[in-house]
Image (spheres, rainbow, N blue to C red):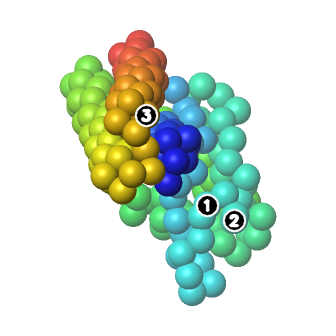
Amino acid sequence: MSADDILYDAEQRMEKAAEVFRHALTGIRTGRANPGLVDSLRVEVYGSPTPIKALASVGAPEPNQIVVRPFDPGTIKDIEKALHASGLGLNPQSDGRVIRITIPALSTDVRRKMTARIKELAEESRVSIRSVRRDANKAADTEKTDGTLTEDDCDTTKEEVQELTKKFEAKVGDLARIKEGEVMEE
């Protein structure tokens, strides 16, 4: 594996770790309604768990309300049941065609807990990024031992991997700060 391959692989894996973090943040409530709160929800329908996005359109027409419009009105009860069982603390109301979810205002205590959760997720993402760095450095050392890379190339590769690590850790930190700001604003 060449130095470029090692760097490319490391960058791809670090990008994926940052993307997983970004996706996890969409499920964290802020003070306003966000369709991302229920996007990852799976509904048991037709005998298999199906993503809610495949069963309905989800939107936020008002700052404190999410509206779920099932494509098939027969799935409305299943969607309601999944929303109740989700553990998100949401109270869906159905009129037979549309499900409306009113998002309650967050208390200060809940906001602090969500901020703590954001920090946990950010740290998990940073650990994942550092794990990729370790793997890339190990691959560079292996290539140096095998004679594919010179010592200088190995050192340069490790320096570039470290720069990638700093870049992606900063990206995760920025995403976390932005989300914490959204959660804490009233």
Q: Report the residue marked by disc 1.
A: 52
Q: Report the residue marked by disc 3.
A: 153
Q: Residue at x 59, y 78 (%)?
A: 45
**Which x, y percent locates residue 185?**
41, 13
* Disc 2 from disc 3: Cα separation: 52 Å
The amino acid type, in three-letter code, at marker 3 is Asp
Horizontal relation, residue 98 to residue 2: left or right? right
Q: Quadrant of residue 61?
A: top right
Q: Quadrant of residue 173?
A: top left
Residue 131 drawn above or below residue 80: above
Residue 115 drawn above or below residue 69: above
Q: Is residue 144 visible?
A: yes
Q: Report the residue marked by disc 2.
A: 55
**Which x, y percent locates residue 172?**
41, 28
Horizontal relation, residue 125 to residue 49: left or right? left
Query: Which numbered mark, 2 or 3, is in the foreground of this view?
Result: 3
Closest to the observer: 20 or 104? 20
Q: Residue at x 63, y 84 (%)?
A: 46
The amino acid type, in three-letter code, at marker 1 is Ile
Callout 2: SS: helix
The furthest residue to the bottom: 47
Of the two numbered discs 3 and 1 on the same chain, state the one appearing first in sequence: 1
Q: Is residue 136 visible?
A: no
- Mark 2 Cα within 10 Å, few/some/many (few <14, many 20+)? many
* Disc 3 from disc 1: Cα separation: 49 Å
On-image quarter of the C terminus: top left
Residue 29 drawn above or below residue 76: above
Residue 104 drawn above or below residue 43: above
**So how many labels did they put on this image?**
3
**Which x, y percent locates residue 19?**
51, 41
Of the two numbered discs 2 and 3 on the same chain, state the one appearing first in sequence: 2
Circles 1 and 2: CB atoms closer than 8 Å: yes
